[in-house]
């Protein structure tokens, strides 16, 4: 029997990372969602990051378990198992019947038949069943096309104590505030357009994960957060216990932003916020609830950056992002695009590195950000920033 007869659609064998997989013919030519089984080569970097995050978080452990309930052709599960060396057993499911067949075949090609269970099942059903039957796993990876919102509570339920949850979102318009009405109905988060859209997107998703976990008496803490091209990915550790959940929830809050002068401050309760900016009298917008704590755990990031994988070209692009994150100020939850500062200063944008240097000389915190390499994070007031940009041009 030919492979086409076996699957009911033509397939081809490709390499990604350090594995070989069968994918439908037509990959790279048509929209991945219109293939008989989903596979998007452009998401390789998201899978590279998942391999690195699992290895970095579980640091030297072996024999662990994972579940990928929206697995497509199974490439993510297979790569995490073979490349991180941490995972012994996996459950990979998909609502698409063709996908389950392809996952099984791909597990077999990579010598994982005995270690990967491929299922044709709805993601929420699978995750809820694992929780009910006490078959929780160390790592759960939620990777939908669009929003992960409806899967996150069950994903938290299915993750073991001290486990890791990785979740992606591609609905950046909603999470960033570009589509505020969608953010409200889908995530119950009030958003508005700002100049730091990508940071808002990261903190919206991280906050939603922390709040989803907290409702179940679980404490989620972001350990690695990446916004890149079409996706956001948050990896969060999960601990059990109401007091821990309460402690984690203290990282949830609001940002109060003035679109007139660009000033931004944190607030615990939106009800106590004046509607006019203290700096310029402009109209304020309130964003939240958002995660205002640390998005990247120093120890996890450090382990990833010290891994031998740093010299492996497979992970080259992922490491570029991770180095960017490592150089970022973690406790300033917004950034300023330098072009926007220059527009306000009525001049051309100075070099970002020069501006960062100058701000540090003046005693401010300042760094670049992986969200936008033509932007800066700083605690300098925006009024001084605009003046500084004006001076830099003089
Ligand atoms: C973005 S793709 C997954 C890609 C895969 N994780 C990877 O890295 O290649 C999303 C997958 O979710 C599946 N899916 C959509 N709704 C689902 C549901 N309710 N339960 C399980 N799978 C679902 C789709 O069939 C599709 O294969």
Image: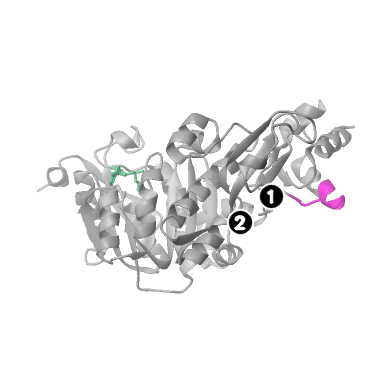
Q: Between disc 1 and disc 2, whose residue precedes?
A: 2
Label 1 near ligand 1 (CB < 8 Å):
no
Identify the residue at image location x=26%, y=42%: 37
- Vertical position of residue 353 compared to residue 90: above or below: above
Residue 61, by quadrant, is bottom left
Kindly identify the residue that appears in the image at 35 percent across and 73 percent down: 63
User: Could you tell me residue 378's position as x and y percent?
Assistant: 75, 47
Residue 267, given in percent of the width and then of the height, sits at 66, 46
The region drawn magenta spans 358-366
Measured along the vertical axis of the image, is residue 18 above or below residue 260?
Answer: below
Give above or below for 175 relative to 48: above
Residue that lies at the very extreme toward the left in this rendered image:
1
Secondary element under disc 2, as helix, strand or loop, is loop
Q: Is residue 359 left or right of residue 292?
A: right
Tell me the residue that label 1 is attached to.
332
Q: Is residue 215 above or below residue 300?
A: above
Residue identifier under label 2: 294
Residue 255 pos. (x, y %): 64, 42
Instruction: Measure the alpha-carbon separation of dots 1 and 2.
Output: 9 Å
Residue 218: % across, % down: 44, 61
Whether residue 102 is visible, yes or no, is yes
Q: Mark 1: few, some, or many residues within 10 Å (few <14, many ≥20)?
A: some
Residue 14 lies in the magenta stretch: no
Residue 359: say if magenta. Answer: yes
């Amino acid at each position: 029997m030919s492979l086409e007869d076996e699957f009911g659609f033509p397939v081809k064998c490709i390499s990604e990372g350090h594995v070989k997989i069968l994918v439908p013919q037509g990959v790279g030519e048509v929209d991945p969602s219109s293939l008989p089984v989903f596979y998007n080569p452009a998401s390789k970097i998201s899978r590279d990051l998942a391999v690195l995050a699992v290895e970095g978080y579980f640091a030297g452990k072996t024999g662990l378990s994972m579940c990928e309930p929206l697995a497509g052709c199974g490439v993510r599960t297979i790569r995490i198992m073979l490349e991180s060396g941490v995972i012994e057993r996996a459950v990979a499911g998909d609502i698409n019947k063709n996908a389950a067949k392809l996952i099984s075949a791909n597990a077999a090609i990579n010598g994982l038949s005995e270690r990967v269970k491929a299922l044709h099942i709805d993601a929420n059903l699978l995750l809820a069943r694992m929780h009910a039957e006490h078959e929780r796993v160390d790592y759960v990876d939620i990777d939908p096309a669009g929003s992960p919102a409806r899967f996150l509570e069950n994903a938290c339920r299915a993750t073991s104590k001290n486990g890791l949850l990785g979740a992606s979102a591609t609905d950046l318009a909603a999470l960033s505030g570009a589509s505020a009405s969608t953010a409200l109905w889908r995530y119950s988060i009030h958003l508005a357009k700002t100049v730091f859209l990508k940071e808002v997107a990261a903190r919206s998703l991280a906050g939603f994960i922390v709040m989803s976990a907290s409702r179940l008496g679980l404490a989620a803490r972001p350990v690695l957060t990446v916004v890149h091209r079409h996706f956001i990915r948050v990896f969060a550790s999960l601990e059990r216990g109401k007091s821990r959940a309460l402690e984690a929830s203290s990282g949830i809050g609001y940002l109060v932003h003035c679109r007139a002068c660009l000033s931004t401050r944190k607030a615990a309760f939106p009800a106590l916020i004046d509607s006019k900016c203290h700096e310029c009298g402009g109209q304020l917008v309130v964003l939240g609830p958002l995660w205002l704590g640390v998005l990247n755990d120093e120890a996890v990031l450090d382990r990833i950056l010290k891994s031998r994988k740093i010299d492996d070209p497979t992970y080259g692009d992922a490491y570029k992002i991770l180095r960017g994150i490592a150089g970022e100020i973690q406790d300033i939850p917004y950034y300023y695009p330098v072009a926007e500062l220059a527009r306000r200063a009525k001049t051309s944008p100075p070099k970002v590195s020069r501006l960062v240097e100058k701000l540090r000389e003046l005693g401010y915190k300042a760094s670049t950000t992986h969200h936008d390499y033509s932007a800066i994070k700083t605690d300098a007031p925006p009024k001084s920033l605009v003046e500084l940009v004006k001076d830099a041009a003089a």
